[in-house]
Image (cartoon, rainbow, N blue to C red):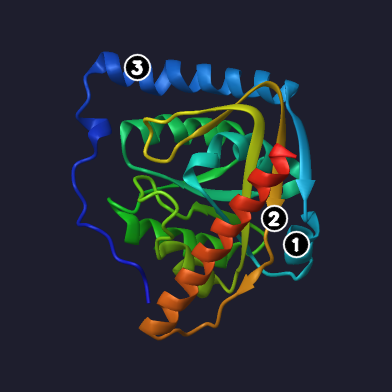
Amino acid sequence: MIWGSAPAEPSPSTQAGPAKRFLMLRVVPLLAVSLIRLLDFTWRYRETDRHHFDAARAAGKPIVGAFLHGRIFLLLRFMGRSRNGRWLSMCSKSLDGDAMAKVEETFGFEVIRGSSGRDGLQAILDMIRRVQKDPELSSCLAIDGSRGPRGKVQGGIISLAQRTGGLIVPITAAARPSYTLRRSWDLTLLPWPFARVDVIYGEPMALPPRLKAEEFEAWRAELEARITALQHRVDEISRG
């Protein structure tokens, strides 16, 4: 079973004016990369249950990293480091997605374009084919997509793991001190300079190659419960 999506629509990135396109495609990625690099230099990382991630890599199967959209800023630079392997990600076909794709590519990610709301089915299929050709390439998806609802696991990541034989590894993070963008749908968390960033890994999930609709939903709900519990745990660790 593959999680469906809305029919393709014209991309907003092709409809924006030249000034906005220049800003989003040239200026914003440069500023974002510079800011992330500068902040990352000051952050102190602390990992919890790293053995789950290492065990998944040692199993010789593709890894499917599952994270919350609101924790991208904390995890992007960290997971892109060479010790964590090579990663395939997805960015939406929007002007914001164009900018984000440039940022992720700068940090070593291979990017497939699409989202839960637009071209999502094709993007998941493209990710599946790419991983099948290169099983050593890890993939990652925001479990709540590019537009939410926040914390609600969408089915694309289940299909990705099922069709590639990959192990889903929940990954999330917290930081102190930090600032939360309350007006953003995903409550994006931004660590302050010199913050301590806690990264935590969940136990790998191995899915059967074939799933009935009710089994698919059960795995989706299980992942949602696990990553919700994992986020609560890392929040407590960060406050400690």
The front one of 165 and 233 is 233
- Residue shown at the point (69%, 55%) measured from the top left: 201
Q: Which residue is mark 2?
A: 201
Above/below status of 52 relative to 184: below
Q: Does any portion of residue 66 appear in the rendered image?
A: yes
Real-space Cα distance between discs 2 and 3?
38 Å
**Residue matched to label 3:** 22
**Real-space CA distance between mark 1 and mark 2, rounded to the nearest whole angstrom:** 6 Å
Circle count: 3
Q: Is residue 109 above or below residue 36?
A: below
Residue at x 44%, y 19% (from the top left corner): 28
Q: CA distance from mark 3 to mark 1?
A: 42 Å
Mark 3 surroundings: few (<14), some (14-19) or many (≥20) residues within 10 A: few
Crowdedness near tag 1: few (<14), some (14–19) or many (≥20) residues, C-alpha within 10 Å: some
| Residue at the disc numbered 1 | 52
- Callout 1 touching callout 2 (CB < 8 Å): yes
Q: For the residue marked with disc 2, what is the amino acid?
A: Tyr
Amino acid on which the number 1 mark rests in the picture: His
Q: Residue at 19% of width from left, 42% of height from top?
A: 10
Q: Nearer the viewer, residue 155 or 9?
A: 155
In the rendered structure, which disc, 1 or 2, sits on the residue that comes first in sequence? 1
- Local crowd size for mark 2, using a 10 Å CA cut-off: few (<14), some (14–19), many (≥20): many
Dot 2 lies on which element?
Answer: strand
